[in-house]
Image (tube, helix red, strand yellow):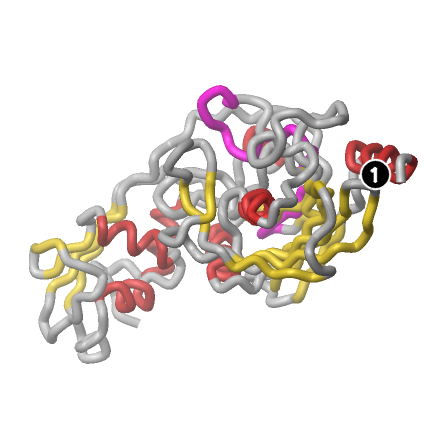
């Protein structure tokens, strides 16, 4: 493997990621295109040279002019020539002022690289304006004593994927950068198994139906997502598993993972989720905290050991209470 400024990619991961608690500083790496790089796209070369850094973040570095070839910013499609001088600047990750908080967590599995959390309805995953405390990240920082992944330019401790505040269920969180990268790659190629249980209004047009509609930010309301042809491809497989009076219990299997994907796709069928006042009726017939949506099955290959892993979470009390009422009215 080509040495870069006398710093190997493995050493770069140590100095850049801060996974061992070291300070995260800006790092510049420079190298010359060798025979194995000639004719290859710069984005591919960077991915091969820095395998511990995600492709999406390397693409971001190119787009933000942190990658120079012969002193000039480039496009990802640039093909290298012999003797090209490549310089990559890895900026210091943007720090997040997040306070560790002693919040009880329902941890279903944990090892040195990752942990599986069963998130309750009402808990926000990541701090944001108006939700600086009481989030999953606050709890993870306390539980793991700060030893969580910090990769891809922004310190987002351990967070590989998210589920909505009012959605309950399983998430995998990364404790090491190796786990974060490996899990991110599995999400990128859609090899992660994610199955949700939900209650929707009405009955589906068929027992099984697949929605393949791109999703993007709504043009009418920037806080909402919408099916739109210029969005990112999104695929959800729905299966009706129980018919109730005016409602259905459905299984939702994600092939992709876009923001609000299940909620938007269910609404596009004319069957929004019960309790979803954003994409469904503004009022619900029950006293509810949010949509009836539970991430009950999560499967993936362990990013470090290679072991196939599958986790299941029972329906939480809020969900069972709604089902009991609906079945009594059936």
Residue that numbered label 1 is attached to: 323
Please determine whether, in this image, residue 307 is positioned above or below residue 21.
below
Q: Secondary structure at mark 1?
A: helix
Main secondary structure along the magenta-highlighted residues: loop
Q: Residues within 10 Å of mark 1 (few under 14, many from 20)?
A: some
Please state the horizontal and vertical placement of residue 90, each as a whole percent of the image: 27, 48
Query: In the image, is 268 to the left or to the right of 96?
Result: right
- Residue 26 in the image: x percent, y percent? 26, 42
Q: Hey, which residue is sitting farthest top in the picture?
A: 130
Could you tell me residue 148's position as x and y percent? 52, 42
Which part of the image, by quadrant, shows the N terminus? bottom left
Which residue occupies the foreground of this view, 193 or 68? Answer: 193
Q: As drawn, is 7 to the left or to the right of 122?
A: left
Q: Position of residue 196 (x, y in %)?
A: 68, 50
Q: Residue 273: in sight, yes or no?
A: yes
What residue sits 7% from the left and 60% below the top? 70
Q: Please tell me in which quadrant of the rendered image residue 274 appears.
A: top right
Quarter of the figure with the C terminus: top right
Q: Is residue 62 magenta?
A: no
Q: Is residue 124 magenta?
A: yes
Q: Which residues are magenta?
A: 112-132
Q: Nearer the viewer, residue 260 or 21?
A: 260
Please give left or right for residue 118 compared with residue 263 in the image.
Answer: right
Seen at 56% across and 47% down, the residue is: 268
In the image, 149 versus 189, the foreground residue is 189
- What residue is shown at x 43% (from left), y 25% (from top)? 97
Count every numbered label the image shows and give the total.
1
- From this viewpoint, is residue 145 visible? no
User: Relative to 121, is 248 on the left or the right?
Assistant: right
Please name the residue shown 29% across and 68% down the image: 44
Residue at the outermost bottom position = 35
């Amino acid at each position: 493997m080509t040495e870069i400024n006398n710093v190997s990619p493995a050493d770069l991961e140590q100095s850049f990621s801060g996974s061992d608690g070291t300070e995260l500083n800006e790092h510049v790496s420079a190298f010359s295109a060798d025979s194995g790089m000639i004719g290859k796209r710069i984005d591919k070369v960077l991915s091969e040279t820095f395998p511990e850094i995600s492709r999406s973040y390397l693409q971001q570095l190119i787009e933000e002019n942190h990658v120079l070839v012969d002193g000039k910013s480039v496009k990802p499609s640039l093909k290298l020539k012999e003797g090209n001088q490549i310089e990559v600047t890895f900026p210091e990750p943007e720090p997040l002022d997040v306070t560790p908080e002693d919040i009880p967590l329902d941890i279903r599995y944990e090892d040195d690289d990752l942990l599986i959390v069963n998130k309750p309805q009402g808990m926000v995953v990541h701090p944001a304006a108006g939700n600086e405390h009481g989030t999953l990240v606050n709890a993870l920082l306390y539980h793991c004593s700060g030893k969580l992944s910090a990769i891809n330019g922004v310190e987002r401790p351990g967070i590989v994927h998210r589920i909505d505040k009012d959605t309950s269920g399983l998430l995998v969180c990364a404790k090491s950068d190796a786990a974060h990268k490996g899990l991110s790659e599995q999400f990128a190629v859609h090899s992660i198994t994610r199955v949700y249980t939900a209650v929707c209004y009405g009955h589906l047009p068929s027992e099984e139906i697949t929605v393949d509609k791109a999703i993007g930010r709504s043009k009418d309301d920037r806080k909402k997502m919408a099916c739109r042809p210029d969005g990112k491809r999104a695929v959800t497989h729905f299966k009706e598993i129980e018919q109730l009076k005016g409602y259905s219990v459905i299984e939702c299997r994600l092939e992709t993972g876009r923001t609000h994907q299940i909620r938007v796709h269910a609404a596009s069928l004319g069957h929004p989720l019960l309790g979803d006042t954003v994409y469904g009726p503004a009022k619900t017939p029950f006293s509810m905290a949010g949509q009836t949506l539970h991430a009950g099955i999560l499967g993936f290959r362990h990013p470090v050991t290679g072991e196939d892993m599958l986790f299941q979470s029972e329906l939480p009390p809020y969900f069972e209470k709604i089902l009991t009422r609906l079945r009594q009215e059936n």
